[in-house]
Image (cartoon, helix red, strand yellow):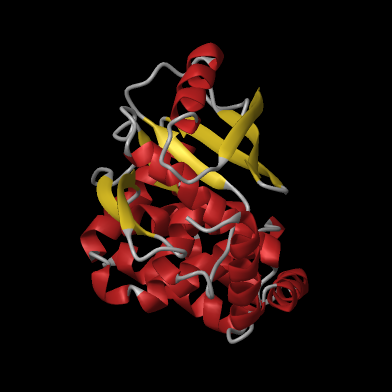
Amino acid sequence: MKTPEQLKGAIRNIAASKNLRSQEVLQMFLFERILERLSVSRYRSNFILKGGLLISSMLGISERTTMDMDTTVRGLPMEKEQITSIVQNILSLDVNDGIQFRFHRIEPIREDDAYNNFRIHLDALYGKINSPMKIDITTGDEITPAAICYDYPFLFERKSVPIMAYTLETILAEKYETILRRNIGTTRARDFYDLHTLFRLRRDEVRPETLRQAILHTAKKRGSTAELKEWADILSDMKEEPALVSLWDNYIRENTYASDFSFSEVLSTVEQISLIICE
């Protein structure tokens, strides 16, 4: 394990070489520390990684970063006191890295959902490093066909740890469903980027029938099956919506790793996935 000063130097070097902000790289390192604790905990089969952190590990940090950690849980009581105790237990595990995690608070999120869902706020402490972090914990998500054991590769060490995670098809399905459901009113350019980049780089790994089923299951769960049938009209509206082009332009300006793609290219990927559903 590096000293705090060595860690800061390594973070600066990685950030400079990949044109990223140092805080982004630090967050990715600290998430690795949490995942290592999770991987050796008795709860390693209960927490399923999803969202930006999983996508970043699949694409590489130069293609995607995140400041949050998203998980869904199974086989655990989703009550505030129990989740607080479980998370504190995981964070307190000693993996010989010198980092301490200080639990701040837990708050409900997605309050219109049928299930309890929570956001954990904490600080990571290492020498003079004091970095705030967030972990979202949800339940009841559809995973098609089921969660997988995924070897999460570390950025700062030549190793990986086994954790439970979403399938590639479920990640794509959630992104696709969100894009169609939000339609031209979306403010989430990252959904377009994630869908396009994952599908482009991991196309050979996508199982078309599994993706089709994942999209159908996700839409049924979220009450958006009607939007699936209207995909052609939705895409037509998106192509003619200036606000979406501006949204995309702002996104690639702030995230240089996305600057190689035009909005029309991204919409073409949405169309390709739509055609898979129709097969």
Residue 263 sits in quarter: bottom right
Residue 249 position within the rendered picture, expressed as x and y whole percent measured from the top left: 73, 78
Position of the C terminus, as image quadrant, is bottom left
Q: Is residue 263 above or below residue 247?
A: below
What residue appears at the point 52 percent right and 58 percent down from the top-left corner?
2
Is residue 110 visible in this depiction of the protein? Answer: yes
Is residue 99 found left or right of 186 in the rendered image?
left
What residue appears at the point 61 percent right and 26 percent down from the top-left corner?
112
Q: Is residue 35 above or below residue 168?
A: above
Q: How many marks?
A: 0
Residue 142 position within the rendered picture, expressed as x and y whole percent measured from the top left: 36, 39
Residue 228 sits in quarter: bottom left
Is residue 219 found left or right of 130 in the rendered image?
left
Residue 166 position within the rendered picture, expressed as x and y whole percent measured from the top left: 35, 49
What residue appears at the point 40 percent right and 45 percent down from the top-left corner?
36
Is residue 177 visible in this depiction of the protein? Answer: no
What residue appears at the point 30 percent right and 59 percent down from the top-left corner?
211
Q: Is residue 103 above or below residue 178?
A: above
- Foreground residue among 172 and 17: 17
Residue 79 position within the rendered picture, expressed as x and y whole percent measured from the top left: 50, 14
- Foreground residue among 273 and 105: 105
